[in-house]
Amino acid sequence: MALAVFALQSVFVPAYPGRDMSRYLQTFFQLGYHVPVYPAVLNTRGPLAALGVAVPLEVGGWAAEIWLALLYASSIVAWGRVALTFGSRAATLTSALLLVFPSYGILFHQLASDALFAAAFAGWAVLLSKAIQRPSMRTFAFAGLGLGALVLVRPANQVLLIMTLLPFALRVPWRDRFAWIGAFFIPAVAVSQAWKVFATIRYGEAVTLRPSTGLVAIAVLLVPFVLPSPWRARAGVVAALLVVAAVAIKGVPGQTPAEYTRSVIRNESNQFVYRSFELDRIMAPENGPASRRLARVVQRKLLTKEPYRSYGIDVHEFFSSGSDRIFGDLTGVARAGDLAEATREAIRRHPGAFASSIGRTLWDQLANRPVYAPEQVTAARTQTGSQQGQTDFIVVNGRRLPKPSEGQPIPASAIGPLLWTPGGSAREVWTSPTEHSFVFSDAHDERRYNKLGADVGQLASRLPTRDGSQTVIHRLNQISHRFPPLIAWLVVGVVALAYRRPRNVLVAIAPCVAGLVVIVATALVAPSVPEYAAPVSPAFFPLAAAGLVGVPVRRGRRVVAESWRPLAGLAVGVAAAAWAAKIYFDRLKAFVDGAGAGNDLHVFLRASGKVLDTASPYAFHADKTFAYPPFLAWLVAPLHPLSSSAAGFLWTLLSLAMVTLALWLLDLRDWRCYALAYVFLFTRSSIDLGTIEPLLLLAVAAAWHWRERALQTAGAVAVAIVLKLFLWPLEIWLVLTRRTRAAVLAAGFAVALAAVSWAAIGFAGIGDYPGLLRRLANEESTSSYSVVALGVRAHLPLLAARIISVLVTLALLAAAAWVARDERRSPRDRDIATLTITLAAALAASPIVWVHYFLLLLVPLALTRPRLSLLWFVPFAFQPVGEAAWPAGDARNLGLALAATLVILGAAVVRPDWRPSLSRNPPLRLSSWR
């Protein structure tokens, strides 16, 4: 099946060069050299990846595509085998998800290390699962060999050595744990360091691949643990004697432990230089003395030479450019120690920017970075040929110069690649601001360099060059964009595992943890690149499959599982409460520090100033237009004399209080649900922007709580409608539930409130109000989360989208009428379902719907799930949308909002006897207020 899927994809998506394919080809050819030409690629590329990329091309271009197909199929089979631990349904679900996962399929159409790493990681996951299920010296030794192979595919995978601590998670005697750690760690170190030993012997000083003294020392210390009991003490004594003798004769090799620790603390490995300079752009001379020393080196060695001199690059532009060309020159002229000192100063000066950048990179890797296939391969070649000879120019200091490509400040790096030239020197020579060439002092070195380039070019040209279907590729990329991100599968897996607790759960968790280790380690030092996370992304699918459909634990172990759920509930509640406390403490502190009121509250305060002067508050100001009856302006008027900061501070406290009181009136007593409600995106958006949604929520909650008291219900409904006209379906709810007296009173109260508030300003602006609403709807309806926006996104005319909005509203009201007369439901359930559908009708009828409107979803959520359950995690689907972001027709944001809304509304409308039984999956339970 996997081969058939790949063959179908290959009809439209031909194999193409992946990231840095030429670098792996350079590595491959230099593996056969006794003297390397370009040692930097040997230092940074794995030998197995070089062989896996180049050997198929040596056979022929067709062989590369067959090789990629075999890797794709074998990786899917491997992940299916891992998921089979949890039953056939889990294996089938995992395999099916991977077959329809566009990013994973596209990854295997790229000839580079990424596809090789993906296949090797899948194979290693199988070895890891066997070691967990049948732990022994032999199974962990094979897992260690697989881990060493992963390092030879991609050297950065050395971070996965942390996974050798996995035996600590097994319930076995400590002696066995240490033995299995040694069996896991020693083969991994032996394989990964053997390549460095070989490279050092073969290439000598040309490469910097030196075996890690620390890793080898740890491996030696673990040797006694893997030996039989009678030999452990003897081996330990021999190892200690050898270490003492080696130190006595040779001294301490390399750095002492204290020196090594100091090196890590001082960041002398410069792992954050790239992020600080190119990604975060926080390096600058004003950061400190080390940064100023570095700036002087740059000024002396680079800025006085071409191309910097002619293009007028000064120190400020040099450090703020974020250019990879400039970064290459910086690392070429500065000492490692100077770079490390300047990097530390930059991080200390800008810790927030540095940390937030890492956080954004990590989030992008988990939530926003699918793999895309190139859509314009053919067009790019055509365009290149048609635009030859056309050059843009810029004027620098009165001199007309060619404009650097790719938005760079200079046409190329001043310093060329660092080559190994035994016969003499090789350097980049600039003869003009744009003309430069690489000059060798020895002809033999030049011939070796040219031969390497020719061999690489010849081999790379064997890759299939047939054109693909650009239309199909575009559609495939669209599907890849819309496919649920990794974070979704991770959340689903964690939550589902917390409920179902399948057998051998560590088999699903271990590969997922390994994948997260790779993603987090990469995010610390590198930008967000889809191919960094894609090879390990399948690890999240068995986790989700195991949690959703995996074979559950034996009945005898269910008590243990259920005893764990209260702890999970406590953890969720505490985490949400801490998050909420931080969010709103920071918000209140910002007001204390002088921050102004939120956008909506600012509009309300301006309108209240108008009505206090008996003037019309109705003038169009785009998204700052006051579009409410004057009642709201009078309601906010007491805050008008205050400063903007004070008004924002009080309104935030009032909003939090209103949300809390509303949930209490909805009979919610579980403190964890309160904590979650405070951190939902629509709650934060409502409070941060200073909207009236908390007040609307309180009005609806009051109408529900006192629904059997006509006067109180009528007052609450009237206030809700006068504050926000789109809530008029609440009147229908009262009529459908046979509360006619309350409905009549509510209509009368609403008219009275509107009339009195308008009469207080002499009915100023009442004639302009309908036109203002129409203009605002025309301006913003297609850019919101409304049904109208969904229709426009479906390529319908605006008029047709509005008609659909009306039809959907009428259909929902008809459904509410039907549900209100369903005698199979209890009276309370009929009231809940009817209220839920009328609220849905209100959202459907509104031409404009923003994120904070969805705060009303707390009503059906609290009424149907008064205790913590899975449904309380659905609102987190709004998280990627953004608090104040306009979807502007973005299908992803609209889809997230629509899906989450339908799930919550559907859970409240479905009859109780149709809902899934919770007896097999009981909700999280912990002490609550009730």
Image: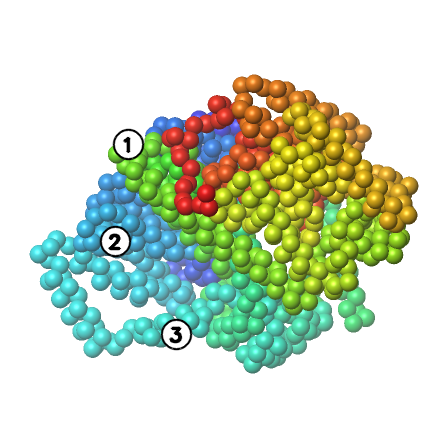
Distance between mark 3 and mark 2 Cα atoms = 27 Å
Residue corresponding to mark 1: 555
Q: Amino acid at mark 3?
A: Arg
**Residue 304 occupies which quadrant of the picture?**
bottom right
Whole-percent x, y for residue 690 in the image: 69, 53
Ranked by sequence position, the earlier of labels 3 and 2 is 2
**Rendering coords of residue 9 (x, y %):** 54, 31
Quarter where residue 332 is shown: bottom right
**Which residue is painted at 51% across and 49% down in the image?**
675
Measured Cα–Cα span from mark 2 to mark 1: 32 Å
- For this rendering, which residue is in front, 733 or 760? 760
Q: Nearer the viewer, residue 558 or 473?
A: 558
What residue is shown with label 2? 181
Residue 356: horizontal and vertical position, in percent? 56, 60
Seen at 73% across and 38% down, the residue is 718
Q: CA distance from mark 3 to mark 1?
A: 53 Å
